[in-house]
Image: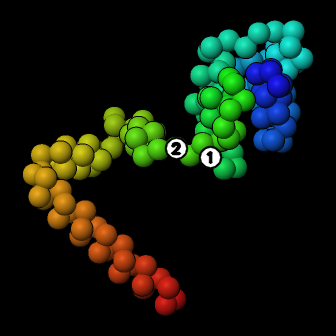
Amino acid sequence: MTINERIKELRCCLKMTQTEFGNLISLTQNHLTGIESGKRNVTERTIKLICSINWPPSNKLVNEKWLTTGEGEMFIEKDHDQEFMEAVGSIDFHDDELIKKVIIDYMKLSDENKKRLADYIIELAEIAKKQYKGK
């Protein structure tokens, strides 16, 4: 199976039209038709873009190795670093002074105090979980 065929397989797996899929990767429906039919080559930019999107409904990433070679699984889980960068990237730092202050103050903590804070947050989460289970 070619990369062109795998792109079509991916789109069909996601139950998207060529227009919907193309809009997400900045290609026209006609251009995507050319890719899927093998009349157009797949650019490195298109590969990188396809593999950088959190595809609904699973919110998973496309495995670049699968897309380019057919090896491995179609989707991969995001690792913690990717999730962190995504979360940080979504913060509007211009409007949220509290988030800025919390991050700056956290980074000033000693390793021991960071661990204490993490333990405290985990304890609070466990208490909240027990309280909500009872309702």
Pointer 2 residue: 78
User: Circle 2 sits in a helix, a strand or a loop, which is it?
Assistant: loop
List x then y, in percent, for residue 63.
Answer: 62, 34
Q: What residue is rendered at 43% in x and 79% in y? A: 129
Q: Residues within 10 Å of mark 1 (few under 14, many from 20)?
A: few
**Which quadrant would the N terminus be assigned to in this image?**
top right
Nearer the observer, 112 or 117: 112
Amino acid type of the residue that numbered disc 1 sits on in the rendered structure: Asn
Amino acid carrying mark 2 in the image: Lys
Q: Position of residue 52 (x, y in %)?
A: 58, 30
Nearer the observer: mark 2 or 1; the answer is 2
Viewed as shown, does residue 123 lie left or right of 91?
Answer: left
- The residue pinned by badge 1 equals 59
User: Would residue 47 appear left or right of 111 to someone viewing this image?
Assistant: right
Q: Residue at x 62, y 29 (%)?
A: 65
Residue 82 falls left or right of residue 16: left
Query: How crowded is the residue under tag 2: few (<14 C-alpha within 10 Å), some, or many (20+)?
Result: some
In percent of width and height, residue 114 lies at 18, 56
CB contact under 8 Å: marks 2 and 1: yes
Q: Is residue 28 visible?
A: yes
Residue 113, quarter of the rendered image? bottom left
